[in-house]
Image (tube, rainbow, N blue to C red):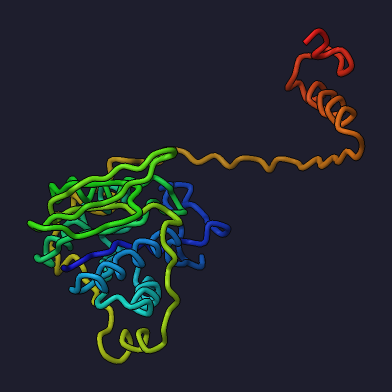
Amino acid sequence: MHIVVGVKWVPNTQAVRFDPHTGTLIREGVPSIVNPHDLHAVELALKLRERYGGRVTAVTMAPPGAVKGLEHIIGMGVDDAVLLSDRKYAGADTLATSYVIASAIKRMGDVDLIVFGQETIDSSTAHVPAQVASWLEAPYIYYVEEVEAIEDNRIRVRRRLEDLVEWYELEMPAVIAVLMHSQKPRPVRLIHKLRAVLEKPVETWSNEILRLDERCVGLKGSPTVVTKITWMPEVPRKQKIFKGEPKEAVNWLIRRLEEEKILPTCGADKCGEGD
């Protein structure tokens, strides 16, 4: 079984800056990390390889610095890693991003299962897995927490919703998005990470390799356009702490809510009378 796991090299959300003219992220000078939710996808992919054999390939579309993130993933035990990096891909929205990733997967040629994390911490759209599935014309399931292979090149997946569990059978190749916190990502092992440096370094595929229409990638291929960015003023923190009996605390809270115009004024001592 050949499993491709999609990961994203995301900026530290505490240090995000935007270009006020293009509305895109400014990555220069901003520390980045592997999207935490994608580590759960990597873990599930590695468990499937251990159970059924095969290999796992990690793929990301990002600037050259994302090699560090892919080396981290190789350190977890992934067999191969591919970085999709080209200036022409810069400024892509989810549609253009998914098009490049799907094109790279097609180029690999023998992929059985594509695994993504539930969403990313920098945008939380959760669009890319579904869009990749659409480009590949493959079945797709979201919120997956368990996968098992069955006969006839099919898999059975367990999907968890808020108060119920669903089981689906999918014909491969298929695309799944792994439920956040459903796996426990394994730690990086030095012996694995050394492979990325000494034996099998991360491959970089530019548009010279993929040969995609430049009108379909990057900003040119992105129908989603940020027209305006508004910086929200910082909300002043007015911390008030009440210490006393529960009934007194309720009356104190009601008075505070009335002062803030959140509740209509009715008098804390009279509200609720007759109930």
Q: Quadrant of the N terminus?
A: bottom left
In the image, farthest residue toward the right: 244
Q: Quadrant of residue 214?
A: bottom left
> Foreground residue, 233 or 173?
173
Q: Residue at x 49, y 52 (%)?
A: 18
Q: Is residue 2 left or right of residue 256?
A: left
Q: Residue at x 30, y 75 (%)?
A: 78
Q: Is residue 91 visible?
A: no
Residue 263, compared with residue 91, is above or below; it is above
Q: Is residue 142 visible?
A: yes
Q: Residue at x 39, y 52 (%)?
A: 179
In the image, farthest residue toward the top: 274
Q: Is residue 245 left or right of residue 37?
A: right
> Foreground residue, 194 or 43?
43
In the image, farthest residue toward the bottom: 198
> Foreground residue, 163 or 254?
163
Q: Position of residue 64 (x, y in %)?
A: 34, 72
Q: Position of residue 203 (x, y in %)?
A: 24, 77
Residue 2, compared with residue 131, is above or below; it is below
